[in-house]
Amino acid sequence: MYPICIRAPFNRRVTDDKGRTMRRRFHRLVAAVGVAAAVAVATPVAVAVPQAGTPSQEAAPLARPAFRMPFICGQVWRGNNWRGHSPAHSVDWNHYNAQGAPDDFGRRVLASAGGTVVASYYSTGDGYGNTVVVAHGDGWRTRYAHLKERTVASGAHVKRGQVIGKVGASSATHEFSPHLHYEQIHNGSVVVAVVQGVRWYDYLDRRLTSTNGC
Protein backbone atom coordinates (compact mmCIF):
# COMPACT_ATOMS: atom_id res chain seq x y z
CA MET A 1 0.00 0.00 0.00
CA TYR A 2 1.33 3.40 -0.96
CA PRO A 3 1.38 6.14 1.75
CA ILE A 4 -1.44 8.71 1.63
CA CYS A 5 -0.26 12.27 1.49
CA ILE A 6 -2.73 14.98 2.60
CA ARG A 7 -1.33 18.42 2.60
CA ALA A 8 -3.03 21.35 4.37
CA PRO A 9 -2.29 24.97 3.61
CA PHE A 10 0.65 26.37 5.57
CA ASN A 11 0.10 28.86 8.40
CA ARG A 12 -3.58 29.04 7.78
CA ARG A 13 -6.39 28.25 10.18
CA VAL A 14 -9.42 27.01 8.27
CA THR A 15 -12.89 26.78 9.80
CA ASP A 16 -16.23 25.54 8.51
CA ASP A 17 -19.50 27.47 8.51
CA LYS A 18 -20.01 26.69 12.23
CA GLY A 19 -16.62 27.93 13.19
CA ARG A 20 -15.13 24.52 14.04
CA THR A 21 -11.52 23.97 13.16
CA MET A 22 -10.83 21.94 9.98
CA ARG A 23 -7.45 20.95 11.37
CA ARG A 24 -9.15 18.80 14.01
CA ARG A 25 -11.07 16.97 11.30
CA PHE A 26 -7.85 16.36 9.41
CA HIS A 27 -6.20 14.76 12.47
CA ARG A 28 -9.22 12.52 13.00
CA LEU A 29 -9.12 11.40 9.36
CA VAL A 30 -5.44 10.47 9.56
CA ALA A 31 -6.04 8.46 12.75
CA ALA A 32 -8.94 6.56 11.18
CA VAL A 33 -6.84 5.61 8.13
CA GLY A 34 -4.06 4.30 10.40
CA VAL A 35 -6.47 2.10 12.40
CA ALA A 36 -8.00 0.62 9.22
CA ALA A 37 -4.55 -0.23 7.85
CA ALA A 38 -3.54 -1.94 11.10
CA VAL A 39 -6.71 -4.05 11.11
CA ALA A 40 -6.14 -5.12 7.49
CA VAL A 41 -2.58 -6.29 8.26
CA ALA A 42 -3.55 -8.17 11.42
CA THR A 43 -6.56 -9.98 9.92
CA PRO A 44 -5.63 -13.52 8.74
CA VAL A 45 -6.33 -14.39 5.12
CA ALA A 46 -8.34 -17.55 4.50
CA VAL A 47 -6.59 -19.96 2.08
CA ALA A 48 -8.36 -23.02 0.64
CA VAL A 49 -6.41 -26.20 1.43
CA PRO A 50 -7.32 -29.47 -0.39
CA GLN A 51 -8.74 -32.00 2.03
CA ALA A 52 -7.61 -35.62 2.10
CA GLY A 53 -9.77 -37.85 -0.01
CA THR A 54 -11.02 -35.08 -2.32
CA PRO A 55 -11.13 -35.67 -6.10
CA SER A 56 -8.22 -33.24 -6.55
CA GLN A 57 -5.91 -35.56 -4.65
CA GLU A 58 -3.97 -37.97 -6.88
CA ALA A 59 -4.64 -41.66 -6.37
CA ALA A 60 -1.86 -43.76 -4.88
CA PRO A 61 -0.08 -46.20 -7.23
CA LEU A 62 -1.71 -49.60 -7.39
CA ALA A 63 0.24 -52.36 -5.64
CA ARG A 64 1.67 -55.36 -7.47
CA PRO A 65 0.04 -58.67 -6.47
CA ALA A 66 2.12 -60.91 -4.18
CA PHE A 67 3.25 -63.23 -6.98
CA ARG A 68 4.56 -66.68 -6.03
CA MET A 69 6.66 -69.02 -8.11
CA PRO A 70 4.47 -70.87 -10.62
CA PHE A 71 5.48 -74.27 -9.22
CA ILE A 72 4.57 -76.72 -6.47
CA CYS A 73 5.53 -75.80 -2.91
CA GLY A 74 9.05 -76.87 -1.97
CA GLN A 75 10.38 -77.31 -5.51
CA VAL A 76 13.64 -75.52 -6.32
CA TRP A 77 13.80 -73.90 -9.75
CA ARG A 78 16.43 -71.85 -11.54
CA GLY A 79 15.16 -68.53 -12.91
CA ASN A 80 17.24 -66.94 -15.63
CA ASN A 81 16.70 -63.52 -17.21
CA TRP A 82 19.47 -63.87 -19.73
CA ARG A 83 20.98 -61.23 -21.99
CA GLY A 84 19.07 -60.93 -25.25
CA HIS A 85 15.95 -62.63 -23.90
CA SER A 86 12.81 -61.51 -25.69
CA PRO A 87 10.81 -59.75 -24.52
CA ALA A 88 13.08 -57.98 -22.03
CA HIS A 89 12.41 -58.73 -18.34
CA SER A 90 10.89 -62.16 -18.99
CA VAL A 91 12.21 -65.14 -16.99
CA ASP A 92 12.98 -68.71 -18.11
CA TRP A 93 12.52 -71.37 -15.41
CA ASN A 94 14.26 -74.76 -15.31
CA HIS A 95 14.22 -77.64 -12.83
CA TYR A 96 17.08 -80.11 -12.25
CA ASN A 97 17.25 -83.55 -10.66
CA ALA A 98 19.67 -84.62 -7.92
CA GLN A 99 22.38 -85.29 -10.53
CA GLY A 100 22.04 -81.80 -11.99
CA ALA A 101 20.32 -82.87 -15.19
CA PRO A 102 17.24 -80.93 -16.44
CA ASP A 103 14.00 -82.74 -15.66
CA ASP A 104 11.35 -80.06 -16.02
CA PHE A 105 9.42 -81.45 -19.01
CA GLY A 106 5.83 -82.21 -18.01
CA ARG A 107 6.06 -80.67 -14.51
CA ARG A 108 2.96 -78.83 -13.37
CA VAL A 109 2.68 -75.05 -13.80
CA LEU A 110 0.63 -73.12 -11.23
CA ALA A 111 -0.97 -69.69 -11.29
CA SER A 112 1.31 -67.15 -9.57
CA ALA A 113 -1.75 -65.33 -8.20
CA GLY A 114 -5.51 -65.61 -8.44
CA GLY A 115 -7.34 -64.12 -11.39
CA THR A 116 -9.17 -64.75 -14.65
CA VAL A 117 -7.74 -66.56 -17.67
CA VAL A 118 -7.95 -64.06 -20.52
CA ALA A 119 -6.06 -66.15 -23.10
CA SER A 120 -5.40 -69.86 -23.59
CA TYR A 121 -4.16 -70.63 -27.08
CA TYR A 122 -1.43 -72.01 -29.32
CA SER A 123 0.52 -69.12 -30.81
CA THR A 124 1.65 -69.55 -34.41
CA GLY A 125 3.16 -66.11 -35.02
CA ASP A 126 5.35 -65.10 -32.08
CA GLY A 127 7.00 -68.31 -30.91
CA TYR A 128 5.15 -68.62 -27.61
CA GLY A 129 3.59 -71.97 -28.50
CA ASN A 130 1.02 -73.14 -25.95
CA THR A 131 0.28 -70.02 -23.90
CA VAL A 132 -1.88 -69.07 -20.92
CA VAL A 133 -2.40 -65.47 -19.76
CA VAL A 134 -4.03 -64.69 -16.41
CA ALA A 135 -5.38 -61.22 -15.49
CA HIS A 136 -5.06 -60.31 -11.80
CA GLY A 137 -6.73 -56.88 -11.77
CA ASP A 138 -5.42 -53.30 -11.74
CA GLY A 139 -3.63 -53.86 -15.06
CA TRP A 140 -1.54 -56.84 -13.85
CA ARG A 141 -1.18 -60.06 -15.88
CA THR A 142 1.10 -63.08 -16.02
CA ARG A 143 2.02 -65.08 -19.12
CA TYR A 144 3.09 -68.75 -19.16
CA ALA A 145 4.47 -69.96 -22.50
CA HIS A 146 6.00 -72.96 -24.34
CA LEU A 147 3.66 -75.26 -22.36
CA LYS A 148 3.37 -78.94 -23.16
CA GLU A 149 -0.34 -78.64 -22.52
CA ARG A 150 -2.88 -76.14 -21.21
CA THR A 151 -5.37 -77.22 -18.54
CA VAL A 152 -7.53 -74.06 -18.35
CA ALA A 153 -9.68 -72.29 -20.91
CA SER A 154 -10.17 -68.59 -21.53
CA GLY A 155 -12.70 -67.13 -19.10
CA ALA A 156 -11.90 -69.54 -16.26
CA HIS A 157 -11.37 -68.14 -12.76
CA VAL A 158 -8.27 -69.56 -11.10
CA LYS A 159 -6.85 -69.39 -7.59
CA ARG A 160 -3.21 -68.95 -6.72
CA GLY A 161 -1.57 -72.37 -6.85
CA GLN A 162 -4.11 -73.86 -9.28
CA VAL A 163 -2.64 -75.98 -12.08
CA ILE A 164 -2.94 -74.16 -15.43
CA GLY A 165 -0.63 -76.28 -17.59
CA LYS A 166 2.56 -78.34 -17.83
CA VAL A 167 6.11 -77.38 -18.75
CA GLY A 168 7.02 -78.05 -22.36
CA ALA A 169 9.00 -76.77 -25.33
CA SER A 170 6.25 -75.80 -27.75
CA SER A 171 6.85 -73.11 -30.38
CA ALA A 172 5.81 -72.63 -33.98
CA THR A 173 8.97 -70.70 -34.86
CA HIS A 174 11.82 -72.02 -32.68
CA GLU A 175 13.24 -75.24 -31.28
CA PHE A 176 13.71 -75.11 -27.51
CA SER A 177 14.78 -77.38 -24.71
CA PRO A 178 11.96 -77.71 -22.15
CA HIS A 179 11.46 -74.71 -19.83
CA LEU A 180 8.74 -72.33 -18.67
CA HIS A 181 8.76 -68.85 -20.20
CA TYR A 182 7.26 -66.48 -17.61
CA GLU A 183 6.28 -62.80 -17.78
CA GLN A 184 4.77 -60.25 -15.41
CA ILE A 185 2.87 -57.60 -17.36
CA HIS A 186 1.50 -54.25 -16.18
CA ASN A 187 -0.76 -52.11 -18.36
CA GLY A 188 0.36 -53.98 -21.47
CA SER A 189 4.13 -53.85 -20.88
CA VAL A 190 6.40 -56.63 -19.62
CA VAL A 191 8.04 -55.39 -16.41
CA VAL A 192 10.85 -56.61 -14.16
CA ALA A 193 9.33 -59.56 -12.32
CA VAL A 194 9.08 -59.72 -8.53
CA VAL A 195 8.61 -63.28 -7.30
CA GLN A 196 8.23 -64.03 -3.57
CA GLY A 197 9.91 -60.70 -2.82
CA VAL A 198 12.88 -61.32 -5.16
CA ARG A 199 13.26 -58.74 -7.95
CA TRP A 200 14.42 -60.48 -11.14
CA TYR A 201 16.60 -57.75 -12.56
CA ASP A 202 17.85 -58.17 -16.12
CA TYR A 203 20.52 -60.90 -16.42
CA LEU A 204 19.79 -62.31 -12.95
CA ASP A 205 20.37 -66.08 -12.77
CA ARG A 206 19.51 -67.70 -9.42
CA ARG A 207 17.63 -70.50 -7.74
CA LEU A 208 14.55 -70.11 -5.57
CA THR A 209 12.30 -72.44 -3.60
CA SER A 210 8.58 -72.20 -4.32
CA THR A 211 6.17 -71.22 -1.55
CA ASN A 212 3.13 -71.47 -3.82
CA GLY A 213 0.43 -73.44 -2.01
CA CYS A 214 2.52 -74.04 1.12
Image (cartoon, rainbow, N blue to C red):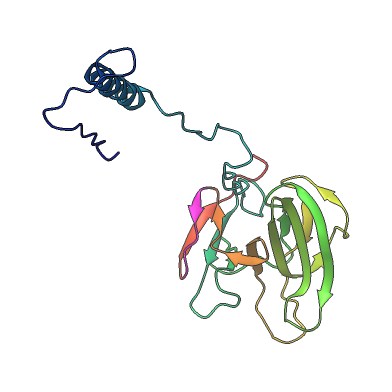
Q: Quadrant of the N terminus?
A: top left
Residue 13: x percent and y percent? 18, 22
From the viewer's perspective, tell me whether residue 96 is left or right of residue 112.
Answer: left
Q: Is residue 62 left or right of residue 127?
A: left
| Residue in the foreground of this view, choosing between 188 and 65 | 188
Chief secondary structure of the magenta span?
Answer: loop
Instruction: Name the residue: 72% across, 51% down.
Output: 136
Image quadrant where residue 101 sits: bottom right
Image check: 70 left or right of 18? right
Residue 199 image point, x, y percent: 49, 56
Could you tell me which residue is drawn at 82 percent across and 67 percent down? 149
Image quadrant containing the C terminus: top right
Q: Is residue 199 on the magenta stretch?
A: yes
In the image, is residue 185 above or below residue 73? below
Q: At 69% from the left edge and 48% from the top edge, which residue is drawn?
A: 113
Look at the picture and state if 59 lies above or below 7.
below
Regarding residue 145, the answer to whether it shows in the image is: yes
Judge whether residue 99 can be spotted in this image.
no
Magenta range is 197-202
- From the top left corner, tell me how far across and down residue 194 is, in percent: 54, 54
Q: Relative to 152, does residue 63 appear above or below in the rendering?
A: above
**Relative depth, front residue between 128 and 41:** 41
**Residue placed furthest toward the left:** 11
Where does residue 147 sit, x and y in percent of width and height? 75, 69
Position of residue 98 relative to residue 146, above or below, is above
Left or right of 104 on screen, residue 159: right
Magenta includes 186?
A: no
